[in-house]
Image (cartoon, coloured by chain):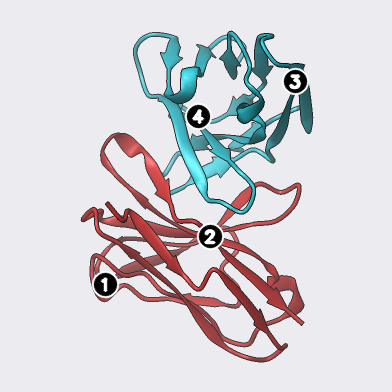
Chain colours: A red, B cyan
């Protein structure tokens, strides 16, 4: 009963470093997405995917890449981390009835 | 433009009293509306949704929400608040393209004993 699993939970990066946030779901959902949460701004969509091999940009895609080689996995890559990317990142998948299920979050600090 | 507004940053209620967390939305067509709750250092948990049908929607943990089309509102309610209900609550609407949820900024609910 794993649902949506994200790793790592916490990460500190130096400016300019790259890293990948991992996301996996075991519910066979076609739709997956990445959001970032910032204080007073709610959640904003970074990228999404409607199925394996298909990705598209959301509201705030700059500085991030995604790929979807399998239905289960949807990693988010930070190419060259900047302090503005300090945030909490949530991976999500959408099930029947349009309900979106979220992972537990990844807290990222860029120094 | 599609948007969700949660006009209150914080709502304070005493345990046992009814609570309301307000949400208004702006979207073309029939709205798909959602409420989520977030506890500290945790992900968002689904509470309830309105897609179609009865305007009063019942959800998890005793919460309910009332859809009002004329006022474009979807307020979250609970008849009797618990201290454990203290958390951050988000209202969201599915965007017109059906590709994402548009979230409000969140309302912190604080229930005192």
**Mark 4 residue element:** loop
Q: Marks 2 and 4, Cα distance to the nearest angstrom?
A: 31 Å
Residue appearing at x 25%, y 56% in the figure? A30
Q: Same chain for labels 3 and 2? Say yes or no.
A: no
* Residue position marked by numbered label 1 in the rendering: A53
Q: Are marks 1 and 4 in contact (CB under 8 Å)?
A: no
Q: Same chain for labels 2 and 1? Say yes or no.
A: yes
Residue appearing at x 66%, y 25% in the figure? B83
Residue B113: mark in rendering: 3
Report whether residue B8 is seen.
Answer: no
Q: Is residue A45 above or below residue A8?
A: above
The chain letter for the residue carrying disc 4 is B
Q: Are marks 4 and 3 in contact (CB under 8 Å)?
A: no
Q: Marks 2 and 1, Cα distance to the nearest angstrom?
A: 24 Å
Q: Same chain for labels 1 and 4? Say yes or no.
A: no
- In this rendering, the label closer to the viewer, 3 or 2: 3
* Sequence order check, earlier mark of 4 and 3: 4
On-image quarter of the C terminus of chain A: bottom right
Q: Residue furthest left?
A: A28
* Residue position marked by numbered label 4 in the rendering: B28
The chain letter for the residue carrying disc 3 is B
Q: Marks 3 and 2, Cα distance to the nearest angstrom?
A: 30 Å
Q: Are marks 2 and 1 in contact (CB under 8 Å)?
A: no
Observer-nearest of A29 and B20: B20
**Mark 3 residue element:** loop
* Residue position marked by numbered label 2 in the rendering: A105
Residue B50: mark in rendering: none
């Amino acid at each position: 009963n794993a649902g949506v699993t994200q790793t790592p939970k916490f990460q500190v990066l130096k400016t300019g470093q790259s890293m990948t946030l991992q996301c996996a779901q075991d519910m066979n959902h076609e739709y997956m997405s990445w959001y970032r949460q910032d204080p007073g701004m709610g959640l904003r969509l970074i990228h999404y995917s409607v199925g394996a091999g298909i990705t598209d940009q959301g509201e705030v895609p700059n500085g991030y890449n995604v790929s979807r080689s399998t239905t289960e996995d949807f990693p988010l890559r930070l190419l060259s981390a900047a302090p503005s990317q300090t945030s909490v990142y949530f991976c999500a998948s959408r099930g029947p009835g349009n309900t979106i299920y979220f992972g537990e979050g990844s807290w990222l600090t860029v120094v | 433009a599609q948007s969700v507004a949660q006009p209150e940053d914080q709502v304070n209620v005493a345990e046992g009293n009814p609570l309301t967390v307000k949400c208004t939305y702006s979207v073309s067509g029939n709205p798909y509306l959602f409420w989520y709750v977030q506890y500290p250092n945790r992900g968002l948990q689904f509470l309830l949704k309105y897609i179609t049908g009865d305007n009063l929607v019942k959800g998890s943990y005793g919460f309910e929400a009332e859809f009002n089309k004329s006022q474009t509102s979807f307020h979250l309610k609970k008849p009797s608040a618990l201290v454990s209900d203290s958390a951050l609550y988000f209202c969201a609407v599915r965007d017109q393209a059906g590709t994402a949820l548009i979230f409000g900024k969140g309302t912190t609910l604080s229930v005192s004993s």
